[in-house]
Image (spheres, rainbow, N blue to C red):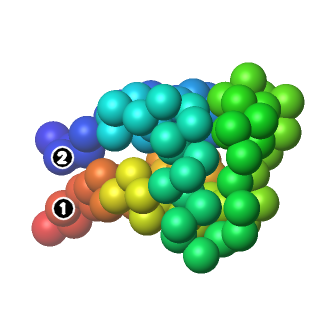
Amino acid sequence: MLAVRMRWPMVNIKDRIKEIRKSLGLSIEDFAKELSKRGCGIVTEKAVSDWELGVRRPLPTKILALAELGRRNVRWVQTGVDPDEIKTPAPFN
């Protein structure tokens, strides 16, 4: 038997960004302020709103800040797949 935990990734980065914000209990305004404190430049409410609506994608520096703030893996923020959750099956002898 394979010891693999299967979970469908969230398809869109917009959904993952919104999940991070909501998991922190922050408004869009407060989320933008917190991201701006992370050394990635100024993040506006409009930028966060555009990301969550799927109008624009965040720059790589912002993705790193999103991952740090949400305590998530950068790859998860980008793709929806968390390498820490992928289990390698035990080899058969």
- Compared with 23, 80 (above or below) is below
Q: Is residue 21 above or below residue 3?
A: above
Q: Which residue occupies 14% across, 67% down?
A: 93
Residue identifier under label 1: 90
Q: Which mark is residue 3?
A: 2
Residue at 59% over, 75% down: 39
Is 56 or 83 nearer to us in this picture?
56
Q: Which mark is residue 25?
A: none
Residue 69 lies in what quarter of the image? Answer: bottom left
**In the rendered view, does 4 fall on the left or right side of 63?**
left
**Whether residue 48 is situated above or below residue 49 in the rendered picture:** below
Give the x, y percent position of residue 43.
69, 54
Element on which disc 1 rests: loop
Where is residue 81? Give x, y as percent: 48, 48
Count how many numbered circles sit on residues in the image.
2
* Residue 20 in the image: above or below residue 54: below
Query: Furthest residue to the bottom?
Result: 39
Are discs 2 and 1 less than 8 Å apart at CB?
yes
> Mark 1 or mark 2, which is nearer the start of the sequence?
2
Q: In this view, does 2 lie to the left or right of 60?
A: left
Could you tell whether 52 is left or right of 75 in the image?
Answer: right
Q: How crowded is mark 2: few (under 14 residues within 10 Å), some or many (20 or more)?
A: few
Dot 2 falls on a residue whose secondary structure is loop
Residue 84, horizontal then vertical, whole percent: 32, 60
Please tell me which residue is depicted at 77% across the width and 60% down the height of the picture: 59
Which of the two residues, 40 or 63, is positioned nearer the viewer here? 40
The amino acid sitting under disc 1 is Ala
Amino acid type for the residue under numbered disc 2: Ala
- Residue 9 visible to the viewer: no
